Image: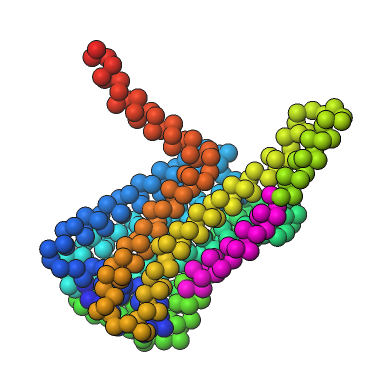
Amino acid sequence: MEVNSSHPLDYHANQTQLEGIVNASSPNIGPFAISCFLGTTVATLLTNCGVLSLFLVDKSLRTPFNVYIMTLLSANIIYAGIDGPLKILTFPYPTWRLGAEVCTLRIYSGYIIAAMAIHFHLLITLNRAWALFWPLSYRNYHSTTVAWWLCGGTVFYLHVLLLPGIILDAVYYRVPADKDCWLDSSRQFAWATFTSWWVFVAPKLFIPICYPFLWRKEMQRRARTAATQRFAEMTMAQTPCTSADVATAPLAQRGSSRGFIVLTLFTISIIVCWMPSLLYFQLLNFIPMDRLQTFAKVAGVLYALQGLLDPVFVCLSLRKVYRYVLRLDRMCINKEAQPMTTTK
Protein backbone atom coordinates (compact mmCIF):
# COMPACT_ATOMS: atom_id res chain seq x y z
CA MET A 1 0.00 0.00 0.00
CA GLU A 2 1.24 3.46 -0.78
CA VAL A 3 2.70 5.72 1.83
CA ASN A 4 0.63 8.86 2.20
CA SER A 5 1.88 12.38 2.17
CA SER A 6 0.33 13.72 5.34
CA HIS A 7 1.58 16.91 6.86
CA PRO A 8 4.49 16.42 9.31
CA LEU A 9 2.51 17.98 12.15
CA ASP A 10 -0.29 15.42 11.80
CA TYR A 11 1.24 12.65 13.85
CA HIS A 12 -1.78 10.35 13.80
CA ALA A 13 -2.18 10.47 10.03
CA ASN A 14 1.53 9.76 9.82
CA GLN A 15 0.90 6.58 11.80
CA THR A 16 -0.62 5.28 8.55
CA GLN A 17 2.66 6.20 6.91
CA LEU A 18 4.53 4.19 9.54
CA GLU A 19 2.29 1.18 8.92
CA GLY A 20 2.86 1.63 5.21
CA ILE A 21 6.61 1.45 5.74
CA VAL A 22 6.16 -1.75 7.76
CA ASN A 23 3.98 -3.23 5.02
CA ALA A 24 6.28 -2.11 2.21
CA SER A 25 8.56 -5.08 2.70
CA SER A 26 10.17 -7.06 -0.06
CA PRO A 27 8.09 -9.83 -1.67
CA ASN A 28 10.34 -12.45 -0.06
CA ILE A 29 9.16 -11.62 3.46
CA GLY A 30 5.59 -10.72 2.47
CA PRO A 31 4.06 -14.06 3.60
CA PHE A 32 5.96 -13.87 6.89
CA ALA A 33 4.68 -10.34 7.51
CA ILE A 34 1.12 -11.40 6.68
CA SER A 35 1.39 -14.33 9.08
CA CYS A 36 2.67 -11.97 11.79
CA PHE A 37 -0.26 -9.58 11.31
CA LEU A 38 -2.67 -12.53 11.24
CA GLY A 39 -1.20 -14.01 14.41
CA THR A 40 -1.24 -10.67 16.20
CA THR A 41 -4.86 -10.00 15.19
CA VAL A 42 -6.08 -13.44 16.26
CA ALA A 43 -4.15 -13.31 19.54
CA THR A 44 -5.46 -9.81 20.28
CA LEU A 45 -9.06 -10.87 19.67
CA LEU A 46 -8.77 -14.08 21.68
CA THR A 47 -7.03 -12.55 24.70
CA ASN A 48 -9.24 -9.47 24.90
CA CYS A 49 -12.45 -11.47 24.38
CA GLY A 50 -11.33 -14.07 26.91
CA VAL A 51 -10.52 -11.57 29.66
CA LEU A 52 -13.61 -9.46 28.94
CA SER A 53 -15.81 -12.57 29.22
CA LEU A 54 -14.50 -13.09 32.76
CA PHE A 55 -15.74 -9.63 33.74
CA LEU A 56 -19.12 -10.33 32.15
CA VAL A 57 -19.52 -13.73 33.84
CA ASP A 58 -18.36 -12.79 37.34
CA LYS A 59 -20.35 -9.91 38.79
CA SER A 60 -17.83 -9.37 41.58
CA LEU A 61 -15.24 -8.31 38.98
CA ARG A 62 -17.43 -5.47 37.70
CA THR A 63 -16.12 -2.92 40.19
CA PRO A 64 -16.12 0.83 39.41
CA PHE A 65 -12.41 0.79 38.52
CA ASN A 66 -12.74 -2.30 36.35
CA VAL A 67 -15.31 -0.51 34.19
CA TYR A 68 -12.42 1.36 32.56
CA ILE A 69 -10.64 -1.94 31.91
CA MET A 70 -13.78 -3.44 30.37
CA THR A 71 -14.23 -0.52 28.00
CA LEU A 72 -10.54 -0.64 27.07
CA LEU A 73 -10.78 -4.34 26.23
CA SER A 74 -13.93 -3.66 24.19
CA ALA A 75 -12.15 -0.94 22.20
CA ASN A 76 -9.25 -3.32 21.53
CA ILE A 77 -11.67 -5.97 20.27
CA ILE A 78 -13.46 -3.58 17.91
CA TYR A 79 -10.23 -2.11 16.57
CA ALA A 80 -8.58 -5.50 16.02
CA GLY A 81 -11.78 -6.91 14.51
CA ILE A 82 -11.96 -4.12 11.92
CA ASP A 83 -8.41 -3.00 11.25
CA GLY A 84 -6.68 -6.38 11.46
CA PRO A 85 -8.64 -8.19 8.73
CA LEU A 86 -8.52 -5.13 6.45
CA LYS A 87 -4.74 -4.95 6.78
CA ILE A 88 -4.41 -8.62 5.98
CA LEU A 89 -6.72 -8.38 2.96
CA THR A 90 -4.96 -5.33 1.50
CA PHE A 91 -1.42 -6.25 2.48
CA PRO A 92 -0.36 -7.93 -0.80
CA TYR A 93 -1.66 -5.13 -3.03
CA PRO A 94 -0.13 -1.69 -3.74
CA THR A 95 -3.56 -0.02 -3.95
CA TRP A 96 -6.86 -0.11 -2.06
CA ARG A 97 -9.34 -2.57 -3.58
CA LEU A 98 -12.22 -2.76 -1.11
CA GLY A 99 -14.21 0.34 -2.07
CA ALA A 100 -14.97 3.71 -0.54
CA GLU A 101 -17.41 2.44 2.11
CA VAL A 102 -14.93 -0.02 3.59
CA CYS A 103 -12.27 2.69 3.42
CA THR A 104 -14.49 4.96 5.52
CA LEU A 105 -14.93 2.14 8.03
CA ARG A 106 -11.17 1.70 8.23
CA ILE A 107 -10.59 5.43 8.75
CA TYR A 108 -13.32 5.50 11.43
CA SER A 109 -11.65 2.61 13.22
CA GLY A 110 -8.17 4.06 12.83
CA TYR A 111 -9.22 7.42 14.24
CA ILE A 112 -12.16 7.07 16.64
CA ILE A 113 -11.77 3.49 17.90
CA ALA A 114 -8.00 3.94 18.28
CA ALA A 115 -8.63 7.20 20.14
CA MET A 116 -11.03 5.38 22.48
CA ALA A 117 -8.31 2.93 23.49
CA ILE A 118 -5.88 5.79 24.15
CA HIS A 119 -8.37 7.76 26.21
CA PHE A 120 -9.49 4.75 28.25
CA HIS A 121 -5.82 4.42 29.22
CA LEU A 122 -5.97 8.12 30.12
CA LEU A 123 -9.11 7.57 32.21
CA ILE A 124 -7.30 4.88 34.20
CA THR A 125 -4.49 7.34 34.94
CA LEU A 126 -6.92 10.09 35.94
CA ASN A 127 -8.86 7.64 38.08
CA ARG A 128 -5.73 6.71 40.02
CA ALA A 129 -4.87 10.40 40.40
CA TRP A 130 -8.34 11.03 41.83
CA ALA A 131 -8.03 8.09 44.23
CA LEU A 132 -4.55 9.07 45.44
CA PHE A 133 -4.78 12.85 45.67
CA TRP A 134 -8.43 13.15 46.76
CA PRO A 135 -9.24 9.83 48.48
CA LEU A 136 -12.25 11.08 50.43
CA SER A 137 -13.89 12.55 47.33
CA TYR A 138 -13.11 9.36 45.43
CA ARG A 139 -14.77 7.14 48.03
CA ASN A 140 -17.80 9.38 48.30
CA TYR A 141 -18.51 10.09 44.65
CA HIS A 142 -16.90 7.43 42.47
CA SER A 143 -19.18 4.53 41.63
CA THR A 144 -19.92 2.12 38.80
CA THR A 145 -22.49 4.53 37.41
CA VAL A 146 -20.00 7.40 37.45
CA ALA A 147 -17.40 5.23 35.70
CA TRP A 148 -19.85 4.27 32.93
CA TRP A 149 -20.85 7.91 32.48
CA LEU A 150 -17.20 8.96 32.21
CA CYS A 151 -16.52 6.28 29.60
CA GLY A 152 -19.67 7.14 27.66
CA GLY A 153 -18.85 10.84 27.83
CA THR A 154 -15.37 10.11 26.50
CA VAL A 155 -16.82 8.23 23.52
CA PHE A 156 -19.20 11.11 22.80
CA TYR A 157 -16.41 13.68 23.18
CA LEU A 158 -14.19 11.83 20.70
CA HIS A 159 -16.99 11.59 18.15
CA VAL A 160 -17.61 15.32 18.45
CA LEU A 161 -13.93 16.06 17.80
CA LEU A 162 -13.15 13.51 15.10
CA LEU A 163 -16.34 12.58 13.26
CA PRO A 164 -16.82 15.95 11.45
CA GLY A 165 -13.38 15.67 9.84
CA ILE A 166 -14.01 12.08 8.78
CA ILE A 167 -17.35 13.04 7.23
CA LEU A 168 -15.87 16.01 5.37
CA ASP A 169 -13.07 13.83 4.09
CA ALA A 170 -15.52 11.17 2.87
CA VAL A 171 -17.73 13.74 1.11
CA TYR A 172 -15.21 16.23 -0.31
CA TYR A 173 -11.54 15.33 0.16
CA ARG A 174 -11.23 11.55 -0.08
CA VAL A 175 -8.31 10.17 -2.05
CA PRO A 176 -9.58 8.09 -5.03
CA ALA A 177 -10.47 4.66 -3.71
CA ASP A 178 -8.50 2.89 -6.42
CA LYS A 179 -5.26 4.53 -5.20
CA ASP A 180 -5.17 4.25 -1.42
CA CYS A 181 -7.22 4.56 1.78
CA TRP A 182 -6.22 7.29 4.20
CA LEU A 183 -7.57 10.58 5.46
CA ASP A 184 -6.10 13.50 3.50
CA SER A 185 -5.11 15.69 6.44
CA SER A 186 -3.52 18.32 4.18
CA ARG A 187 -7.01 19.36 3.05
CA GLN A 188 -8.11 19.94 6.68
CA PHE A 189 -4.83 21.14 8.12
CA ALA A 190 -6.11 23.01 11.20
CA TRP A 191 -8.49 20.24 12.28
CA ALA A 192 -5.98 17.47 11.57
CA THR A 193 -3.12 19.16 13.42
CA PHE A 194 -5.23 20.02 16.48
CA THR A 195 -6.86 16.60 16.81
CA SER A 196 -3.61 14.77 16.14
CA TRP A 197 -1.79 16.52 18.97
CA TRP A 198 -4.68 16.93 21.39
CA VAL A 199 -6.40 13.56 20.93
CA PHE A 200 -3.51 11.23 20.09
CA VAL A 201 -0.15 12.68 21.10
CA ALA A 202 -0.97 14.57 24.32
CA PRO A 203 -2.46 11.56 26.20
CA LYS A 204 0.51 9.35 25.25
CA LEU A 205 2.85 11.95 26.74
CA PHE A 206 0.64 12.88 29.69
CA ILE A 207 0.37 9.34 31.10
CA PRO A 208 4.14 8.67 31.51
CA ILE A 209 4.74 12.21 32.76
CA CYS A 210 2.07 11.81 35.45
CA TYR A 211 3.30 8.41 36.62
CA PRO A 212 6.24 9.60 38.82
CA PHE A 213 3.92 11.92 40.76
CA LEU A 214 1.37 9.13 41.20
CA TRP A 215 4.10 6.71 42.24
CA ARG A 216 5.34 9.14 44.91
CA LYS A 217 1.80 9.58 46.22
CA GLU A 218 1.27 5.82 46.26
CA MET A 219 4.47 5.30 48.26
CA GLN A 220 3.30 7.91 50.78
CA ARG A 221 -0.06 6.18 51.04
CA ARG A 222 1.57 2.82 51.63
CA ALA A 223 3.83 4.31 54.31
CA ARG A 224 0.78 5.76 56.09
CA THR A 225 -1.00 2.41 55.79
CA ALA A 226 1.99 0.57 57.26
CA ALA A 227 2.17 3.05 60.15
CA THR A 228 -1.56 2.65 60.77
CA GLN A 229 -1.19 -1.13 60.74
CA ARG A 230 1.67 -1.03 63.25
CA PHE A 231 -0.38 1.22 65.52
CA ALA A 232 -3.33 -1.16 65.23
CA GLU A 233 -1.12 -4.11 66.16
CA MET A 234 0.20 -2.26 69.20
CA THR A 235 -3.33 -1.36 70.22
CA MET A 236 -4.47 -4.95 69.73
CA ALA A 237 -1.71 -6.15 72.04
CA GLN A 238 -3.02 -3.88 74.78
CA THR A 239 -6.80 -4.14 74.29
CA PRO A 240 -8.92 -7.06 73.02
CA CYS A 241 -10.55 -6.65 69.60
CA THR A 242 -12.17 -8.80 66.96
CA SER A 243 -10.42 -10.18 63.91
CA ALA A 244 -12.71 -8.10 61.68
CA ASP A 245 -11.39 -4.91 63.27
CA VAL A 246 -7.81 -5.91 62.47
CA ALA A 247 -8.58 -6.79 58.84
CA THR A 248 -10.53 -3.63 58.03
CA ALA A 249 -7.56 -1.32 57.41
CA PRO A 250 -5.59 -3.45 54.94
CA LEU A 251 -8.74 -4.47 53.07
CA ALA A 252 -9.67 -0.84 52.53
CA GLN A 253 -6.34 -0.19 50.82
CA ARG A 254 -6.07 -3.40 48.78
CA GLY A 255 -8.18 -2.23 45.86
CA SER A 256 -6.12 0.94 45.48
CA SER A 257 -2.88 -1.07 45.40
CA ARG A 258 -4.23 -3.36 42.69
CA GLY A 259 -5.36 -0.36 40.65
CA PHE A 260 -1.89 1.13 40.89
CA ILE A 261 -0.34 -2.13 39.65
CA VAL A 262 -2.64 -1.95 36.62
CA LEU A 263 -1.56 1.63 36.03
CA THR A 264 2.13 0.68 36.33
CA LEU A 265 1.91 -2.12 33.77
CA PHE A 266 -0.17 -0.05 31.39
CA THR A 267 2.31 2.82 31.63
CA ILE A 268 5.16 0.45 30.78
CA SER A 269 3.25 -0.84 27.75
CA ILE A 270 2.57 2.71 26.57
CA ILE A 271 6.25 3.62 26.81
CA VAL A 272 7.36 0.44 25.05
CA CYS A 273 4.65 0.26 22.36
CA TRP A 274 3.63 3.84 21.60
CA MET A 275 6.68 5.98 22.30
CA PRO A 276 8.88 4.52 19.51
CA SER A 277 6.42 5.67 16.85
CA LEU A 278 6.39 9.20 18.28
CA LEU A 279 10.19 9.15 18.45
CA TYR A 280 10.37 7.99 14.84
CA PHE A 281 8.58 11.08 13.54
CA GLN A 282 10.81 13.31 15.64
CA LEU A 283 13.92 11.63 14.20
CA LEU A 284 12.66 12.30 10.68
CA ASN A 285 13.44 15.98 11.30
CA PHE A 286 17.14 15.14 11.56
CA ILE A 287 17.72 11.77 9.86
CA PRO A 288 16.71 10.75 6.30
CA MET A 289 13.82 8.27 6.10
CA ASP A 290 15.84 5.62 4.27
CA ARG A 291 18.19 5.35 7.27
CA LEU A 292 15.27 4.71 9.64
CA GLN A 293 13.60 1.85 7.78
CA THR A 294 14.52 -0.77 10.39
CA PHE A 295 13.52 1.49 13.27
CA ALA A 296 10.23 2.25 11.53
CA LYS A 297 9.41 -1.43 11.16
CA VAL A 298 10.22 -2.13 14.81
CA ALA A 299 8.10 0.85 15.89
CA GLY A 300 5.21 -0.35 13.73
CA VAL A 301 5.32 -3.85 15.19
CA LEU A 302 5.45 -2.52 18.76
CA TYR A 303 2.51 -0.23 18.02
CA ALA A 304 0.47 -3.22 16.88
CA LEU A 305 1.30 -5.18 20.05
CA GLN A 306 -0.36 -2.69 22.42
CA GLY A 307 -3.80 -4.26 22.14
CA LEU A 308 -2.34 -7.69 22.84
CA LEU A 309 -0.46 -6.63 25.97
CA ASP A 310 -3.47 -4.94 27.66
CA PRO A 311 -5.34 -8.17 28.58
CA VAL A 312 -2.06 -9.88 29.55
CA PHE A 313 -1.28 -7.10 32.02
CA VAL A 314 -4.84 -7.22 33.36
CA CYS A 315 -4.34 -10.91 34.14
CA LEU A 316 -1.02 -10.21 35.85
CA SER A 317 -2.30 -7.34 37.98
CA LEU A 318 -5.80 -8.45 39.04
CA ARG A 319 -5.50 -11.49 41.30
CA LYS A 320 -8.99 -12.87 40.70
CA VAL A 321 -8.61 -12.70 36.92
CA TYR A 322 -5.24 -14.41 37.24
CA ARG A 323 -6.81 -17.20 39.29
CA TYR A 324 -9.51 -17.67 36.64
CA VAL A 325 -6.84 -18.00 33.94
CA LEU A 326 -4.87 -20.53 36.02
CA ARG A 327 -8.06 -22.51 36.65
CA LEU A 328 -8.89 -22.62 32.93
CA ASP A 329 -5.32 -23.64 32.13
CA ARG A 330 -5.45 -26.51 34.65
CA MET A 331 -8.80 -27.65 33.24
CA CYS A 332 -7.30 -27.79 29.74
CA ILE A 333 -4.28 -29.74 31.01
CA ASN A 334 -6.54 -32.19 32.85
CA LYS A 335 -8.69 -32.75 29.77
CA GLU A 336 -5.60 -33.48 27.68
CA ALA A 337 -4.24 -35.87 30.28
CA GLN A 338 -7.53 -37.68 30.91
CA PRO A 339 -7.53 -39.89 27.76
CA MET A 340 -3.98 -40.97 28.58
CA THR A 341 -4.94 -42.10 32.08
CA THR A 342 -8.04 -43.99 30.89
CA THR A 343 -6.15 -45.99 28.29
CA LYS A 344 -3.82 -47.25 30.96
Q: Which residues are magenta?
A: 201-222
Vertically, is 276 above or below 82?
below
Q: How is the image coloured?
A: rainbow
Q: Classify the position of the N terminus by image quarter.
A: bottom left
Q: Which quarter of the rendered picture does the C terminus lie within?
A: top left
- In percent of width and height, residue 269 lies at 45, 58
Closer to us: 277 or 166? 277
Which residue is nearer to you in this view: 90 or 248?
A: 248
Q: Residue furthest right?
A: 239
Q: Quadrant of residue 51?
A: top left
Q: Is residue 133 left or right of residue 9?
A: right
Is residue 32 at least partly visible in the picture?
Answer: yes
| Residue at left offset 26%, top offset 58% | 37
Q: Position of residue 23 (x, y in %)?
A: 23, 68
Q: Position of residue 192 (x, y in %)?
A: 43, 81
Q: Main secondary structure of the magenta part?
A: helix
